[in-house]
Amino acid sequence: MEDRTDGSMSFWEHLDVLRKDLVKIAVATLVFAITVFFFKKEIFSVILAPKNGDFVIYRLFDLIDSWLGNVGETDFSVQLINTGLTEQFLIHVKTSMYVGFLCVLPYALYLLFHFVSPGLYDDEKKYSSRMVVSGYFMFMIGVLLSYFLIFPLTFRFLGTYQVSEEVVNMISLQSYMDTLIMMCLLMGIVFELPILCWLLGRLGVLSAPFMRRFRKHAVVAILVVAAIITPTSDAFTMLVVALPIWLLYELSIVVVRRVNPGKSCDTENNRLS
């Protein structure tokens, strides 16, 4: 087994290497952000697509309604407004930075993993590399699910909700972007649940029997998280969010069972019960 210590470099030299990696990540993010900045029309046509009734998820639900014999109101469009002199330009810049960072994220994870890998055993490198790659893909799946399903349903409900016909909704671009980014980020983080459970299972902290034992409690927690992610009083939208999170929890049980059957933990739980 290889030695985990690297005596050829001092602490400050390691710190300098980390600083260089962070600078590389920042420069790469800036380069991609500048590139994205010049594709304003294409980027915002994607970002603003959920505000129109011809978005893919709306068409799908309208098709399902027609199959069920329901005739719903398919004409849907919300006009966004701008309330600040510099707001649109600043949103353009921030959006370019966000998209640029998403493009650079695989490279950033590679550099950070390359930085810590000399201090890992060979088997730890193998599992860590899998965790990094899987974590990135799970994060992106969460972001895409939020963009294509959760955010559109939330926006359509809130954007068209009126307490009275005398009150007209005037939704700002800033509010739209803040909600979209927040929900995509939260769903990306939530989709890291199997990766986190896998890591805790590898460390022996979490076991499949323990997760099965507290499944009912987990369902309640999932509903609470879904209610936080979707700022609506619509039970349907909340269930749409809760369902994939529950499936992630069940997937996490399978993952943990493979890395840590948890016989000792199961025995302890039976003793406590």
Image: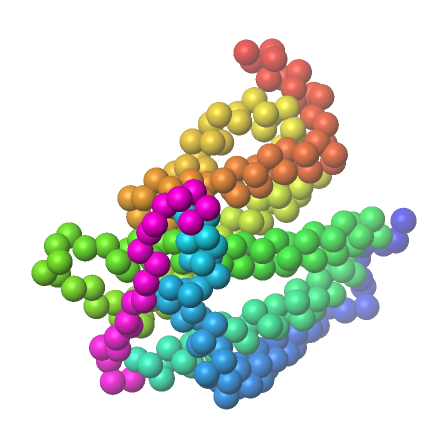
Image quarter of residue 212: top right
Magenta segment includes 195: no
Residue 190 in the image: state x and y as whole percent: 51, 48
Colour scheme of the rendered structure: rainbow
Residue 245 in the image: state x and y as whole percent: 51, 42
Q: What residue is shown at x 57% (from left), y 44% (from top)?
A: 193
Left or right: residue 30 compared with residue 73: right
* Residue reaching furthest to the bottom: 38
* Residue reaching furthest to the front: 69
Q: Is residue 17 visible?
A: yes
Relative to the observer, which residue lies in front, 198 or 205? 198
Magenta segment includes 68: yes
Q: What residue is shown at x 90% (from left), y 49% (from top)?
A: 1
Task: Report how many numbered discs are placed on residues in the image.
Answer: 0
Q: What residue is shown at x 32% (from left), y 63% (from top)?
A: 76
Left or right: residue 79 compared with residue 48: left
Q: What residue is shown at x 21% (from left), y 68% (from top)?
A: 170
Left or right: residue 264 compared with residue 249: right
Relative to the observer, which residue lies in front, 118 or 263? 263
Above or below for 52 versus 210: below
* Residue reaching furthest to the left: 166
Residue 209 in the image: state x and y as whole percent: 64, 24
Q: Quadrant of the C terminus?
A: top right
Residue 181 in the image: state x and y as whole percent: 42, 64
Q: Is residue 188 visible?
A: no
Q: Main secondary structure of the magenta part?
A: loop
Above or below for 14 versus 159: below
Question: What's drawn in magenta, residue-wise?
Answer: 66-86
